[in-house]
Image (spheres, rainbow, N blue to C red):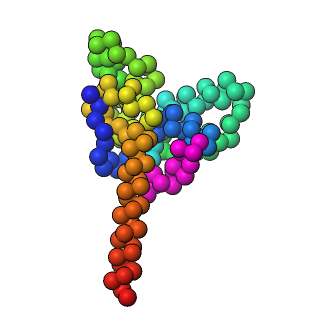
């Protein structure tokens, strides 16, 4: 079973998060700014780049500039030999148990695991099938971020009151 990440310093955004961000959904409004306040490093995988580029091709180039901007500005975690070996283990284990989630997601999971990155996804039930994968669901992230903001406000208020 995957585990929910506690305080990871590196986060990898699943393709569904980037797509919602590009669509400017209410859930992902100001997401990158909020993530930068919590994590040291925000990433996507080469598999996510591939999936985004497929979407552009299917939509006859619509959104290409936005995707290219993301590709230029965010760290991209590659599919290397170490991640490929991990993906082979993940795929085999899931196939043996009849719980495959699709090769693209299995590759994304392997890249996250080999880079010690937690995966931010809307599809936590899907990724929970993978052992030792740190995941954060979008809803739980917003709850955590809200608590952090509230704590910062309380600390700032206490600091202000103690000076007077």
Q: Where is residue 48 in the image (x, y as percent from the top left)?
A: 51, 32
Q: For the magenta stretch, what is the residue range?
A: 25-38
Q: Is residue 36 above or below residue 74?
A: below
Look at 67% across and 26% down and name the residue there: 57
Look at 35% across and 23% down and name the residue there: 87
Left or right? Give the position of 62 relative to 40: right
User: Image quarter for residue 26?
Assistant: top right
- Magenta stretch encompasses residue 131: no
Left or right? Give the position of 58 relative to 91: right
Q: How many labels does the image show?
A: 0
Residue furthest to the bottom in view is 164
User: Image quarter for residue 79?
Assistant: top left
Q: Is residue 93 above or below residue 38?
A: above
Q: Is residue 28 visible?
A: yes
Q: Is residue 107 visible?
A: no
Q: Where is residue 10 in the image (x, y as percent from the top left)?
A: 37, 47
Nearer to me, 109 or 99: 99
Look at the image and tell me in which quarter the N terminus lies.
Answer: top left
- Magenta stretch encompasses residue 28: yes
Look at 44% across and 41% down and name the residue there: 138
Q: Main secondary structure of the magenta part?
A: helix
Look at 56% across and 38% down and name the residue there: 20
Left or right? Give the position of 14 relative to 68: left
Q: Position of residue 148 (x, y in %)?
A: 37, 58
Q: Where is residue 59 in the image (x, y as percent from the top left)?
A: 70, 27
Look at the image and tell me in which quarter the C terminus lies.
Answer: bottom left
């Amino acid at each position: 079973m995957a585990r929910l990440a506690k305080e990871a310093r590196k986060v990898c955004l699943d393709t569904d998060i980037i797509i919602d961000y590009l669509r400017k959904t209410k859930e992902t409004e100001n997401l990158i700014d909020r993530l930068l306040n919590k994590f040291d490093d925000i990433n996507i995988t080469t598999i996510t780049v591939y999936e985004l580029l497929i979407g552009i091709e299917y939509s006859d180039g619509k959104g290409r500039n936005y995707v290219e901007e993301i590709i230029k500005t965010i760290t991209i975690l590659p599919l290397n030999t170490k991640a490929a070996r991990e993906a082979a283990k993940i795929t085999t284990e899931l196939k043996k148990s009849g719980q495959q989630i699709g090769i693209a997601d299995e590759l994304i999971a392997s890249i996250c695991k080999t880079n010690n990155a937690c995966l931010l996804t809307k599809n936590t039930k899907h990724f929970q099938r993978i052992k030792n994968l740190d995941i954060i669901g979008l809803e739980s992230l917003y709850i955590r971020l809200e608590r952090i903001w509230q704590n910062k406000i309380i600390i700032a208020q206490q600091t202000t009151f103690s000076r007077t």
